[in-house]
Image (spheres, rainbow, N blue to C red):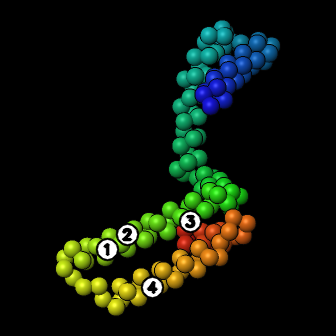
Amino acid sequence: MGWSTYFAFIFAAINTLTVTYYLAIQNYPFLETIFPTFEQYIVIVILIGIPLLIGIGYAHYKRTLAFKSETDITAEANPYNRRNIVNNTISSELAIKNLELLIKLAKKETIDDEDLAELSKLHEKYSKLSKERTFSNNVDLKFLKENITNT
């Protein structure tokens, strides 16, 4: 993991810098006046490139729909990932409902018919979902589209 993530990236960057300098910049005199030495080229590229890449990465994750689209595609393409998202959503919803009821009981309030009806509705909804879904059908995907995403 470390090799493929970190060392490969570093070696690719060194390779790109070396190739672009010695094959491109040295062959064009006007570029050689901007970058007279390889070391100056590296410093200039690092000073401009790293902040630029950080800005592009930030925009990719926070300011554009590109990352959301990638995440949606991953959920649609991978049934195991999709199942995990659905399971976490169901668990969160049930945990919140359980806490609401626990707070009521702690305050010595009674659980009324409205609470029982909501519990029955949740039980029916998730029992039906549990019986219908498999990794080979699209029940989880349908659940995601109806309950989680804005599509």
Name the foreground residue: 120 vs 33.
120
Which badge, 1 or 4, comes first in the chain's sequence? 1
Residue denoted by label 2: 96
Discs 1/4, front: 4
Please state the total of marks drawn on the protein image: 4
CA separation in Å, label 3 and label 4: 20 Å
Dots 1, 4 in contact, CB < 8 A:
no
Q: Is residue 114 above or below residue 135?
A: below
Dots 4, 2 in contact, CB < 8 A:
no
Dot 1, crowdedness within 10 Å: few (<14), some or many (≥20)? few
Looking at the image, residue 43 sits to the left or right of residue 14; the answer is: left
The kind of secondary structure element at disc 4 is helix
Furthest toward the top, the residue is 37
Q: Where is residue 87 drawn, in percent x and y?
A: 54, 64
Residue 86: image tag: 3
The amino acid beneath tag 3 is: Val
Give residue 32's quadrant in the image. top right
Residue denoted by label 1: 100
User: Is residue 45 in view?
Assistant: yes
Q: Residue at x 59, y 47 (%)?
A: 60
CA separation in Å, label 4 and label 2: 15 Å
| Quadrant occupied by the C terminus | bottom right
CA separation in Å, label 1 and label 3: 21 Å
Q: Where is residue 56 drawn, in percent x and y?
A: 58, 40
Q: Is residue 8 above or below residue 137?
A: above
